[in-house]
Image: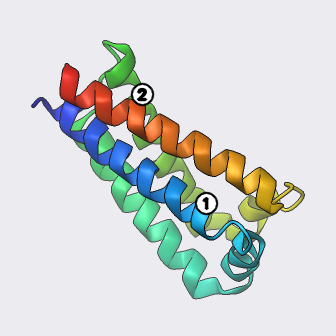
Amino acid sequence: MTITDTLAALIGLYFVAGGIGLLAERNHVSELMRELTSQAMIGFLGGLIAFAIGGAIVAVHNNWDSLLSGFVSLVGWACLAEGVLMLACRRWFLGLFANWNLSPNTVMVFGLGTSLVGLVLLWAAFVS
């Protein structure tokens, strides 16, 4: 497997796990967002983790030669940007999502979509 395939598989697995988590906890996502906003340490650790993962992906993979490699690089840059924003201005950044409809039905759609994208990434990683 190439680095693109490996990262696509890992990101795909992460998306599938996250999507399943959203589906399993769809009645509690609003509570999760409240805790992330109100608990400074949780927000800081989340930002630190996103920064580390995004920085690692960007450091080893900033390749835009194909759709799959471009998507992997985009995810890396998005994680890095999220980490920077969570560390530098967490309340403002999370405030951008404050008015999102996080009803169980909306979260179910996000969970299904996230899982589907993850499955496509896993498939692409193993067929290329």
| Residue wearing tag 2 | 71
What residue is drawn where x is 27% and y is 40%? Answer: 9
Task: Judge whether 22 appears above or below 117 on screen.
Answer: below
Three-letter amino acid code at the position of disc 1: Leu
* Contact? badges 1 and 2 (CB < 8 Å): no
Determine which quarter of the picture holds residue 73: top left
The N terminus - image quarter: top left
Pointer 1: what residue? 23
Tell me if residue 7 comes above or below residue 88 in the rendering: above
Work out whether residue 80 can be spotted.
Answer: yes
Residue 89: x and y, percent? 68, 66
Number of numbered callouts drawn: 2
Question: Which residue is outermost to the right?
Answer: 99
In percent of the image, x 49 and y 35: which residue is there? 117
Relative image position of residue 42 (x, y in whole percent): 56, 82
Up the image or down, 94 lies above or below 3; here it is: below
Give the class, few, some or many, for how many residues have Cα within 10 Å of label 2's Cα (few <14, many ≥20): some
Q: In this image, 5 relative to 45: left or right?
A: left
